[in-house]
Image (spheres, grey):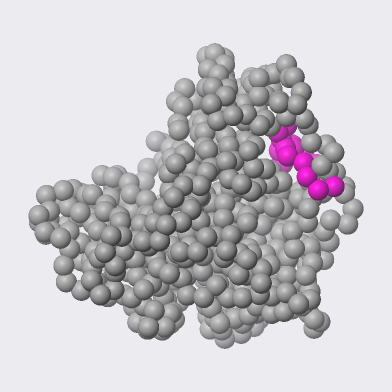
């Protein structure tokens, strides 16, 4: 790791790429894609109020990472914020490599002014994902961007090749600084109603002069008549479920979070916090005028509905007229039954050729014997030791100073306990670092029971899981009789409605320590998360990669931190945190190919 200036870091990274290309002729295998990012604050006014947002290479939202399944990805990040930073890769399974997960359970934060390099393989995955900052409530200020993993040429798409690819980020938004938002939570207060809804970081188009103030920039997406586009939509917000729709256009759902779906047309889609969907949209309407793109809040009071409606413009290339008429209707605001039935209608395309969750053949998940069952109960925020906290099974997670993964490797005592209860215990709620002891190659059933008053989304790093059931009421053993045991969609983020339950099945074959969290940023920040430890009793580099050479050490292991290049002369050139000599030696030994293309 090196505390290099922006210029010297860029020069070193370029030199690194040149050096590895010198040996590419003798190597073969999966390509590499290289990215160099500078994370910094920039000024923006999404809702007409000037504030600082988090940008990557000056972009908000950040750049798209577009690679192909099985490619290796190297991302060198320079942290120019005034506080530590980590980025996590929402939905990427990081096979055998939780060291690159970018959450506090596996990584020490990147200090301000430092740069650090992520290196991982997008193994056996396709589809639509996104990255975002995982600590300090920073996602509320941006720092997110899209990830596209394309099929290899030998694997056909289960639909015609689209004429274009469009990424859309939808999110609720506060005009307060993210540091003020987290202080509000630290002080035991609720964040209140968001100030608006953004589309690709922009405020609403002025579709109604009495609702939207003048001077707000809006998103305009340019398309050509008659063409079909793949539109990837990500809800990167804080806590608000959003309904997405395009005036007069059908949304043909084809993929969600790495799984091709049974292709069905929708006029609108509820997208909950942390979720990603791909639609095919054909530009088959009157091409002489524009159309509204809408993302509106779900399950909110009628008095705030207009305020929480994001509006962009779909612009046909030969349009001569603005969008007109009322905004396209979404579902009835209080109709959770509609939303649940819509979620149940999303099914896995089991006949499509594509990367699938391990093990191969796990699409027969209904025939696999469950080894562990965890019923995770969520309740409304509650006071624990005088602080407002959120819990799962009565435990509010507190991140230790030493990441769990490092503590496990170095046998640091007292950092965590492998005693997370598999059901709600009859005892007072507490703050603790208690994690789940998963069974390697076991098949785990997890039931999320939401006894709170708002929709919660839950995400599991390192895996795709099968969504097998959801219903209102309290889950019981008899609920298993309603499970979809054939084509439940495999994904990484699922919603749980208030007063309802959702059940998932997951095969624990990916060794590591993996974060299971509420994607709702406020409830996550207040403690609603847990980690699952998956250990192979037979230690092998075949099931888990070793500690990376560039690991940052903190907490009880701070003394292991190597001096930076500014404090000690080194023989090897350091690029971000990678030694070129080590990198080339490693690639030669594994016969991997270094991609000649430098993406930035």
Q: Is residue 104 visible?
A: yes
Q: Nearer the viewer, residue 115 or 543?
A: 115
Looking at the image, residue 282 sits to the left or right of residue 257; the answer is: left
Q: Tell me which residue sits at (46%, 47%) in the image.
A: 42
Quarter of the picture containing the C terminus is top left
Q: Is residue 476 magenta?
A: no
Q: Is residue 62 left or right of residue 207?
A: right
Q: Quadrant of the N terminus?
A: top right
Q: Residue at x 58, y 37 (%)?
A: 78
Q: Where's residue 223, x and y in %? A: 22, 49
Q: Residue extending furthest bottom? A: 473
Q: How many marks do you count on the picture?
A: 0
Relative depth, front residue between 590 and 496: 496
Task: Tell me: 276 left or right of 207.
Answer: right
Report the front residue among 256 and 298. Answer: 298
Task: Please tell me whether residue 554 belongs to the stretch shown in magenta.
Answer: yes
Q: Is residue 233 visible?
A: no
Q: Main secondary structure of the magenta part?
A: loop
Query: Where does the image place residue 16, in percent across and percent down from the top left?
Result: 57, 21
Residue 277 shown left or right of residue 455 in the figure = left
Which of the 4 image quadrants contains residue 578?
top right
Residue drawn at x 35%, y 70% is 309
For the record, the magenta segment spans: 538-556
Q: Position of residue 407 (x, y in %)?
A: 82, 49
Give the percent coordinates (x, y) of residue 434.
Answer: 79, 64
Q: Quadrant of residue 450?
A: bottom right
Q: Is residue 191 above or below residue 122?
A: below
- Residue under the point 11% across and 59% down: 321
């Amino acid at each position: 790791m090196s505390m290099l200036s922006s210029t010297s870091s860029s020069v070193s990274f370029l030199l690194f790429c040149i050096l590895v290309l010198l040996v590419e002729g003798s190597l073969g295998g999966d390509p590499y894609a290289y990215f160099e990012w500078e994370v910094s604050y920039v000024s923006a006014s999404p809702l007409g109020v000037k504030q600082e947002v988090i940008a990557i290479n000056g972009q908000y939202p950040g750049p798209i990472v577009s690679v192909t399944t099985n490619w290796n990805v190297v991302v060198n990040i320079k942290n120019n914020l005034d506080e530590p930073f980590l980025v996590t890769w929402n939905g990427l399974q990081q096979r055998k490599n939780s060291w690159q997960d970018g959450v506090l359970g596996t990584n020490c934060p990147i200090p301000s002014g430092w740069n650090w390099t992520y290196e991982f393989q997008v193994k056996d995955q396709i589809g639509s994902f996104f990255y975002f900052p995982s600590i300090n409530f920073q996602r509320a200020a941006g720092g997110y961007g899209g990830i596209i993993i394309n099929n290899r040429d030998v694997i056909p798409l289960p639909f015609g090749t689209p004429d274009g690819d469009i990424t859309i980020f939808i999110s609720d938004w506060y005009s307060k600084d993210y540091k003020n938002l987290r202080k509000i939570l630290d002080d035991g207060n609720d964040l209140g109603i968001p100030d608006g809804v953004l589309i690709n970081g922009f405020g609403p188009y002025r579709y109604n002069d009495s609702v939207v103030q003048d001077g707000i920039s809006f998103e305009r997406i340019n398309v050509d008549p008659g063409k079909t586009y793949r539109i990837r939509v990500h809800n990167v917000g804080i806590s608000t479920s959003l309904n997405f729709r395009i005036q007069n256009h059908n949304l043909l759902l084809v993929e969600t979070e790495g799984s091709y779906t049974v292709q069905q047309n929708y006029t609108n889609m509820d997208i909950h916090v942390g979720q990603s969907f791909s639609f095919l949209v054909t530009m088959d309407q009157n091409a002489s005028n524009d159309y509204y793109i809408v993302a509106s809040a779900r399950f909110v009071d009628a008095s705030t509905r207009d305020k929480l409606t994001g509006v962009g413009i779909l612009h046909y290339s030969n349009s001569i007229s603005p969008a007109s008429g009322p905004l396209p209707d979404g579902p009835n605001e209080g109709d959770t039954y509609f939303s649940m039935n819509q979620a149940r209608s999303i099914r896995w395309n089991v006949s499509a050729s594509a990367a699938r969750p391990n093990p191969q053949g796990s699409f027969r998940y209904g025939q696999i014997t469950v080894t562990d069952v965890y019923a995770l109960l969520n309740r409304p925020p509650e006071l624990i030791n005088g602080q407002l906290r959120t819990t799962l099974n009565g435990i509010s997670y507190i991140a230790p100073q030493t990441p769990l993964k490092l503590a496990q490797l170095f046998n640091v005592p007292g950092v965590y306990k492998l005693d997370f209860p598999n059901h709600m215990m009859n005892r007072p709620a507490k703050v603790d670092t208690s994690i789940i002891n998963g069974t390697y190659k076991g098949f785990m059933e997890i039931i999320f029971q939401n006894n709170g008053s708002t929709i919660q989304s839950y995400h599991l790093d390192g895996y795709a899981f099968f969504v097998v059931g959801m219903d209102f009421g309290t889950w019981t053993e008899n609920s298993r009789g309603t499970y979809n045991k054939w084509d439940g969609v495999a994904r990484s983020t699922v919603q749980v409605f208030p007063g309802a339950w959702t059940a998932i099945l997951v095969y624990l074959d990916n060794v590591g320590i993996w974060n299971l969290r509420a994607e709702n940023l406020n409830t996550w920040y207040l403690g609603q998360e847990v980690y699952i430890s998956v250990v192979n009793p037979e230690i092998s580099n075949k099931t888990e990669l070793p500690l990376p050479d560039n690991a940052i050490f903190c907490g009880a292991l701070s003394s292991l931190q190597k001096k930076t290049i500014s404090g000690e002369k080194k023989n090897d050139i350091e690029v971000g945190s990678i030694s070129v000599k080590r990198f080339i030696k490693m690639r030669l030994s594994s016969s991997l190919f270094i991609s000649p293309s430098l993406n930035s």
